[in-house]
């Protein structure tokens, strides 16, 4: 009987989780998107270990923000291809910091920790389940990329690259790499804003 | 007896648990496909040199949607690439008028639910004797509360004939009628006017012949170069007033001067229809902000 109760409890929990998924239709919050050239909104969120991480911790440094969702197949495709992991690896010693943010309404520190472990992610995955930081930046997709300059201004917002289907054989541009190279060379970012593609951020409201 | 019962119960519990896991993992880990493609033609045989239409029919499971050529705020467009025998040519893929799907967080996406037919006109060569195989690669993202990427290669083998033989007539007629049309061809519209204030604020005024269409939605054809925001559609009696702002994205100096858009509506029989409009956007030189 006891074992059966456990099974029932798991079933109940799972069905509750699904009710949570489907009841995601609620009042709209106006998206106040962070603007290119303006100061990027500060934030403090818990990482996968429950430690607070703030944007101002990186004052004076270049920061890449990556909106993520472990369940999104477009995010999964980029992790399988090591798109973000390779970029991080190639730029971390050039003074580029990297933070992933999960604004999915259903995320928890544990989910973020598991995702980080599964993908061997060397940077923090921050829990924004209430969606406030996502709304402050106007993040709409996963992945959705933002680059903040040393002076705290927003220098890039948009897609990771120009290949939504992931099958481009020539002419592929990684917009984040292009912008980082220009920022590190003290040049103006030539393409500071692109249309992001991916799954919609699974906001609470 | 007791041990035997125990084993039985154990197995039973295990199978329930497995069943729950399978049910739970289905939508999360993409175990099953939620969009199903087929390739159709509007003829059952090809006549040399005579154009015909083919279409990818995508059927979505209830509650799942795929994306228009412009997915909206988020998503991935549904793409069709035809592979044709030597001498055949294909016209552009035609996307029927989409629907709007509002998502939490003020995210609006454009797409299709139920069934959609993405069609293109194929012209075969004059010298044609053997059967021809038309192939298409289809790529899509299908979403409900979660998303799934899908791709498929679909084929259709058609014989050659000297006489016309129509096929799938109802299906092609239904979706051909849902393709965006020019304002002059729209039986429900008397006039449409687009105006801009030169500061990025635009209005589209549609005058209908009878009462205004239902579920009127404004769909920008692309969001690649312009940030289009604050779209509002208001209908009264026999007119619809649409407002939005369009700003070139930062650094997009080569933004096209024309923005294609579609006004989608349901006609008085509840059929989805679309009107194609062109919006000219004043180019650089105008001061920022």
Image (spheres, coloured by chain):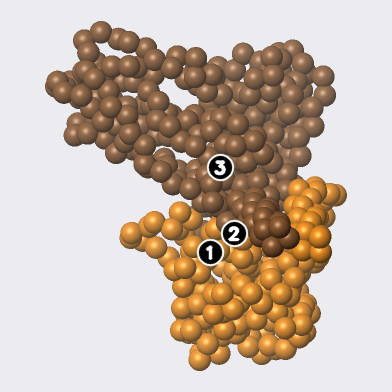
Chain colours: A orange, B brown
Whether residue B230 is visible, yes or no, is yes
Task: Check disc 1 and report its element: helix, strand or loop.
Answer: helix
> Left or right: where does residue B289 sit relative to residue B225?
right
Q: Residue under circle 1?
A: A76
Residue plotted at (69% across, 34% down): B217
Extreme-right residue of the structure: A27
The chain ID associated with circle 2 is A
Asked if labels 2 and 1 touch by Cβ distance under 8 angstroms, the answer is: yes
Task: Tell me the quarter of the picture where residue B239 sits.
Answer: top right
Residue B261 rendering spot, x and y as whole percentages = 59, 36
**Residue drawn at 39 percent across, 19 percent down:** B42
- Residue B46: horizontal and vertical position, in percent? 26, 18
Residue B199 image point, x, y percent? 70, 50
Residue B68 sits above or below residue B105 on the image: above
Q: Are marks 2 and 3 in contact (CB under 8 Å)?
A: no
Q: How far apart are marks 1 and 2 (CA)?
A: 6 Å
**Residues under labels 2 and 3: Cα distance?**
15 Å
Q: Are marks 2 and 3 on the same chain?
A: no
Picture disc at residue B34: 3
Q: Kindly tell me whether residue A37 is visible in this rendering.
A: no
Q: Nearer the viewer, mark 1 or mark 3?
A: 3
Numbered-mark total? 3
Q: Residue A72: which numbered mark, if any?
A: 2
Rendered view: B170 above or below A157: above
Write down the quadrant of residue B162 in the picture: top left
- Position of the C terminus of chain A, as image quadrant, is bottom right
- Which residue is at 73% across, 48% downward? B103
Cβ–Cβ below 8 Å for labels 1 and 3?
A: no
Disc 2 is placed on an element classified as: loop
Q: In this view, does A184 lie to the left or right of B153?
A: right
Q: Which quarter shows the N terminus of chain A?
A: bottom right
């Amino acid at each position: 009987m006891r074992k059966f109760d456990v099974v029932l409890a798991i079933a109940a929990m799972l069905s509750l989780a699904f009710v949570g998924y489907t009841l995601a239709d609620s009042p709209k919050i106006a998206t106040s998107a962070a603007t290119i050239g303006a100061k990027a909104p500060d934030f403090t969120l818990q990482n996968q270990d429950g430690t607070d991480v703030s944007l101002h911790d990186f004052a004076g440094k270049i920061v890449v923000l990556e909106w993520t969702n472990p369940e999104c197949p477009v995010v999964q495709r980029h992790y399988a291809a090591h798109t973000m992991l390779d970029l991080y690896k190639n730029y971390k010693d050039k003074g580029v910091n990297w933070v992933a943010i999960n604004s999915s309404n259903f995320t928890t520190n544990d989910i973020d920790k598991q995702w980080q472990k599964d993908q061997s992610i060397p940077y923090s995955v921050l829990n924004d389940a209430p969606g406030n930081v996502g709304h402050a930046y106007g993040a709409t997709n996963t992945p959705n990329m933002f680059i903040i300059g040393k002076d705290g201004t927003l220098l890039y917002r948009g897609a990771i690259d120009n290949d939504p289907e992931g099958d481009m054989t020539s002419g592929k541009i990684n917009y984040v790499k292009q912008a980082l190279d220009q920022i590190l060379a003290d040049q103006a970012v030539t393409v500071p804003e692109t249309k992001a593609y991916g799954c919609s951020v699974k906001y609470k409201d | 007896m007791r041990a035997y019962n125990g084993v039985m119960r154990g197995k039973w519990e295990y199978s329930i648990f497995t069943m729950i896991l399978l049910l739970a993992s289905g939508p999360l880990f993409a175990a099953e496909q939620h969009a199903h493609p087929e390739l159709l033609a509007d003829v059952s045989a090809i006549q040399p040199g005579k154009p015909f239409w083919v279409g990818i029919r995508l059927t979505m499971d209830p509650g799942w949607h795929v994306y228009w050529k412009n997915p909206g705020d988020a998503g991935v467009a549904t793409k069709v690439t035809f592979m044709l025998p030597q001498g055949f040519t294909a016209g552009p893929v035609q996307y029927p008028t989409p629907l709007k799907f509002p998502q939490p967080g003020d995210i609006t996406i454009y797409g299709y639910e139920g069934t959609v037919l993405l069609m293109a006109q194929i012209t075969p060569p004059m010298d044609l004797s053997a059967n021809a195989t038309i192939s298409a690669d289809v790529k899509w993202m299908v979403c409900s509360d979660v998303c799934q990427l899908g791709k498929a290669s679909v084929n259709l083998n058609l014989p050659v004939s000297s006489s016309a033989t129509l096929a799938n007539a109802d299906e092609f007629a239904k979706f051909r009628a849902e393709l965006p049309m020019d304002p002059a061809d729209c039986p429900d519209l008397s006039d449409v006017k687009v105006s801009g204030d030169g500061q990025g604020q635009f209005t589209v005024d549609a005058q209908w012949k009878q009462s205004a269409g239902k579920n009127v939605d404004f769909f920008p054809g692309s969001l690649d170069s312009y940030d289009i925001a604050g779209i509002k559609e208001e209908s009264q009696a026999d007119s619809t007033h649409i407002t939005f702002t369009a700003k070139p994205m930062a650094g997009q100096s080569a933004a096209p001067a024309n923005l294609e858009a579609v006004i989608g509506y349901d006609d008085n029989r509840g059929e989805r229809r679309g009107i194609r409009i062109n919006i000219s956007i004043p180019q650089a030189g105008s001061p920022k902000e």
